């Protein structure tokens, strides 16, 4: 039987946080370790440039950090190919061909891009490259003929748009060259981890994230400053667990569900203090983050090796993507020089 293929990735605009971990990294590692997939994981520097054209150093500085985060969570270069998007020119050429199969009005309707355009306050100055990045994402996915894309919930519209492009391409050129991908998402309710301040989104600009590279001390301080129940002033007071970030995090990260239920009951009844529940959450997070931190430190001692992992991964990615590009050019009939 032929193996399934995964292509996934992240924009390198900063280090990865525990929201990324729960939203997709954990799934990617599990799928990798199942042994049933060819895995490609891409550092999407070209996509990151679409809204950072005048600030490329931010991307350059994040690239190795994201590589370290991948290795730290257990992406294993012996089992997965880690590649750098800008090192695979076939992706840009495929993007150009796919752009001819997509309308501007369809691009304007992509809900994730719409939200981002609002958040980024571009006004009338939306970079064309930013508007079309879902098409370049379709190139990323299809270049590797990926059928599985483990990502966060916000990426569903990209997959929808990719499937449309695949169908349109195969129909237009009358050949089943491209493969339709499926998303692989976290369990319901775990799609988006709120920030430690209770804001729905964990992000660098809000300074409300816990990063995979944070030291144990920093993580403890962040957990101690977490948003709980502002009306829970005295230990004896009954407390709210809904909207209380400590319990939100415990629900997601603690595998001991019985213990969480017991703590919730006690907290709601009164008699359980915030410091206690925060200390407990810190223990749970430490159990998850310590092995990640240790692997990160080991790899960080040899950045030459990390660079080599990216060079080798990108070389392998080029041989796969160039093959698909050749098939695409053949299907279009752009094969004059063969
Ligand atoms: N859009 C993704 C993000 O915002 C990054 C990305 C680029 C990606 N190309 C991809 C994800 C292909 C999955 C598949 O982080």
Image: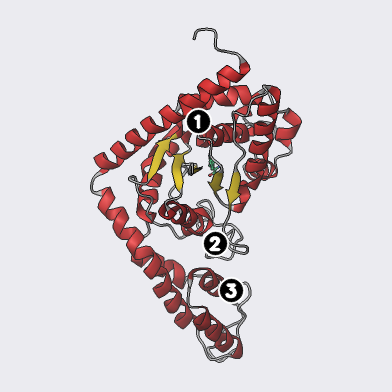
Q: Quadrant of residue 217?
A: bottom left
* Quarter of the image where ligand 1 sits: top right
Q: Which of marks 2 and 1 is nearer the N terminus?
A: 1
Label 2 or label 1, whichever lies nearer to me, is: 2
Q: Does the residue labelled 2 lie within 8 Å of ligand 1?
A: no
Mark 3 burial class by Cα count in 10 Å: few <14, some 14-19, many 20+: some
Residue holding disc 2:
195
Mark 2 burial class by Cα count in 10 Å: few <14, some 14-19, many 20+: many
Q: Earlier in the sequence, mark 3 or mark 2?
A: 2
Percent from the top left, x then y, of residue 25? 47, 53
Count of picture labels: 3
Percent from the top left, x then y, of residue 122? 65, 36
Q: Which residue is rendered at x = 35% and y = 54% of the image?
A: 72
Residue holding disc 3:
244
Q: Quadrant of residue 113?
A: top right
Label 3 element class: loop
Q: Give the number of the disc on residue 308.
A: none
Residue 298 seen: yes
Residue 209 shown left or right of residue 70 in the figure: right
The answer to whether mark 2 and mark 1 are in CB contact below 8 A is: no
Label 2 element class: loop
Residue 93 seen: no
Percent from the top left, x then y, of residue 204? 50, 52
Residue holding disc 1:
54
The answer to whether mark 3 and mark 2 are in CB contact below 8 A is: no
Percent from the top left, x then y, of residue 62? 41, 42
């Amino acid at each position: 039987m032929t193996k399934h293929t995964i292509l996934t990735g992240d924009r390198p605009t900063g280090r990865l946080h525990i929201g990324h971990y729960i939203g997709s990294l954990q799934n990617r590692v599990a799928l990798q370790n199942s042994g049933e997939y060819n895995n490609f994981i891409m550092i999407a520097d070209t996509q990151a440039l679409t809204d950072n054209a005048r600030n490329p150093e931010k991307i350059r500085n994040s690239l190795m950090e994201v590589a370290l985060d991948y290795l730290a969570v257990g992406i294993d270069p012996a089992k997965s190919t880690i590649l750098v998007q800008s090192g695979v020119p076939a992706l840009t050429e495929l993007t150009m061909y796919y752009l001819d199969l997509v309308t501007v009005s369809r691009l304007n309707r992509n809900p994730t891009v719409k939200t981002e355009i609002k958040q980024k306050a571009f006004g009338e100055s939306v970079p064309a490259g930013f508007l079309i990045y879902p098409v370049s994402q379709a190139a990323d996915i299809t270049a590797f003929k990926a059928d599985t894309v483990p990502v966060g919930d916000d990426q569903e519209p990209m997959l929808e748009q990719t499937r449309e492009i695949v169908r349109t391409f195969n129909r237009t050129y009358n050949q089943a060259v491209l493969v339709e991908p499926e998303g692989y998402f976290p369990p319901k309710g775990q799609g988006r981890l709120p920030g430690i301040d209770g804001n729905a989104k964990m992000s660098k600009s809000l300074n409300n994230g816990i990063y995979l590279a944070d030291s144990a001390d920093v993580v403890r301080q962040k957990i101690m400053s977490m948003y709980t129940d502002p009306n829970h002033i005295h230990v004896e007071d009954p407390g709210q667990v809904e909207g209380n970030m400590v319990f939100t995090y415990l629900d997601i990260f603690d595998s001991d569900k019985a213990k969480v239920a017991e703590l919730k009951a006690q907290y709601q009844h009164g008699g359980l203090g915030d410091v206690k529940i925060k200390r407990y959450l810190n223990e749970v997070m430490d159990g998850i983050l310590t092995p990640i931190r240790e692997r990160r430190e080991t790899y960080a001692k040899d950045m030459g090796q990390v660079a080599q992992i990216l060079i080798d991964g990108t070389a392998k990615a080029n041989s796969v993507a160039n093959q698909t590009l050749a098939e695409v050019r053949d299907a279009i009939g752009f094969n004059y020089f063969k």
